[in-house]
Image (cartoon, helix red, strand yellow):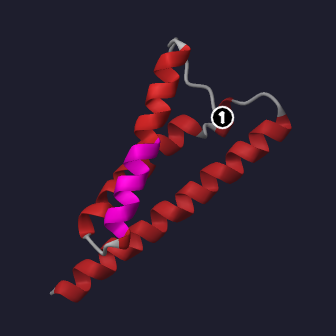
Amino acid sequence: MGRFDVLLSRDHYTALLGIAVGLELVDGALFVANLDLGAHCLLAFMLAVTPIMHNFWAEADPHTRLVEMIMFCKNAGITGALLFYIGGKSASDT
């Protein structure tokens, strides 16, 4: 996992992880239900979380840097797919 220099207790990290997983589950369910809100929420989540969680440029270890860069690129690909999905839905609505 990337470096995010905020000192929190272990309980806070557990709570934040639970919130993130909950958001992904709700957003994913909305997306599967073919609601535009789900795609928009997933896009916002990916844009906010990707540079924080996968900041490969801050890693010193080459192996860790490579893994984080792969995860960053995966999330960038998912973000691009969401943009295409949202754009396609908007174009077909007109």
Camera-side residue of 34 and 42: 34
Q: Residue at x 18, y 85 (%)?
A: 93
* The C terminus lies in quadrant: bottom left
From the image, give the main secondary structure of the stretch colored magenta. Answer: helix
Q: Which residue is drawn at 70% across and 53% down?
A: 70
Q: How crowded is mark 1: few (under 14 residues within 10 Å), some or many (20 or more)?
A: some
* Total residue callouts: 1
Q: Is residue 52 above or below residue 50?
A: above
Residue that numbered label 1 is attached to: 1
Magenta stretch bounds: 21-31
Camera-side residue of 86 and 33: 33
Residue 48 appears in which quarter of the rendering? top left
Q: What residue type is labelled 1?
A: Met
Q: Which residue is drawn at 61% across and 50% down?
A: 72
Compared across the picture, whether 42 is left or right of 55 comes to: left
Camera-side residue of 53 and 87: 53
Compared across the picture, whether 89 is left or right of 18 comes to: left
Say what secondary structure mark 1 lies in.
loop
**Residue 38: percent from left, percent from top:** 31, 62
**Residue 24: percent from left, percent from top:** 42, 51
Q: In this view, does 2 lie above or below 66?
A: above
Q: Is residue 14 above or below residue 74?
A: above
* The N terminus lies in quadrant: top right
**Residue 61: percent from left, percent from top:** 82, 31
35 within the magenta span: no
**Residue 25: percent from left, percent from top:** 42, 54
